[in-house]
Amino acid sequence: MRQLVQVERKLSLLHRSRIDIIANILNAAEGGAKKTHIMYRCNLSFRQLHVYLDLLVERGLLKSTPRRKAENIESKVYETTAKGKAFIQAYRSIRAILSS
């Protein structure tokens, strides 16, 4: 059963629209996530990731927060905003209507 779910998830990643990718990124960033985590979880290239992150931050769906690590190295953490969560909710509603 678990393998079937994994196969279905991989198949669903084959033909994604921009809206699907945006929803995936916003889901991955709920609660905060680094770029690398989002990139791997959403199966995006580094270039694709930057295009989408820039777009979503510019539109107010994501916010980036600098976090300090040891040795004074900064990394950014991306988090879904309230507007982004509203987008996810609307996306799920539309998907539910289309799949029923």
Image (cartoon, grey):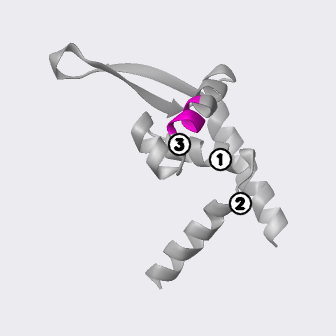
In the image, the segment drawn in magenta is: 46-50
- Residue displayed at 50% across by 46% down: 28
Q: Which mark is in front, 1 or 3?
A: 3
| Residue in view at x 66 percent, y 42 percent | 22
Please identify the quadrant where the C terminus is shown.
bottom right
Residue 72: image quadrant is top left
* Distance (Cα) linking label 1 and label 2: 10 Å
Percent x, y of residue 31: 44, 39
What mark, if any, has residue 68 been given in the picture? none
Residue annotated with mark 1: 21
Read off the residue under disc 2: 15
Amino acid type shown at disc 3:
Ser
Q: Distance between the residues labelled 3 and 2?
A: 15 Å
Report if the CB atoms under discs 1 and 3 are less than 8 Å apart. Answer: no
Residue 2 to residue 81: above or below: below
Q: Which of marks 1 and 2 is nearer the N terminus?
A: 2
> Disc 2 on helix, strand or loop?
loop
Nearest the camera: 56 or 43? 43
Badge 2: residue crowd in 10 Å (few <14, some 14–19, many ≥20): few
In this rendering, would 40 be left or right of 50? left
Quadrant for residue 26, please give it. Answer: top right
Q: Residue most toward the top?
A: 72
Task: Examine the rendered structure and indicate whether residue 6 appears above or below residue 95.
Answer: below
* Numbered circle sitting on residue 45: 3
The answer to whether residue 34 of the structure is visible from this angle is no
> CA separation, marks 1 and 3?
12 Å
Q: Position of residue 81 (x, y in %)?
A: 58, 30
Q: Which amino acid does label 1 sit on?
A: Ile
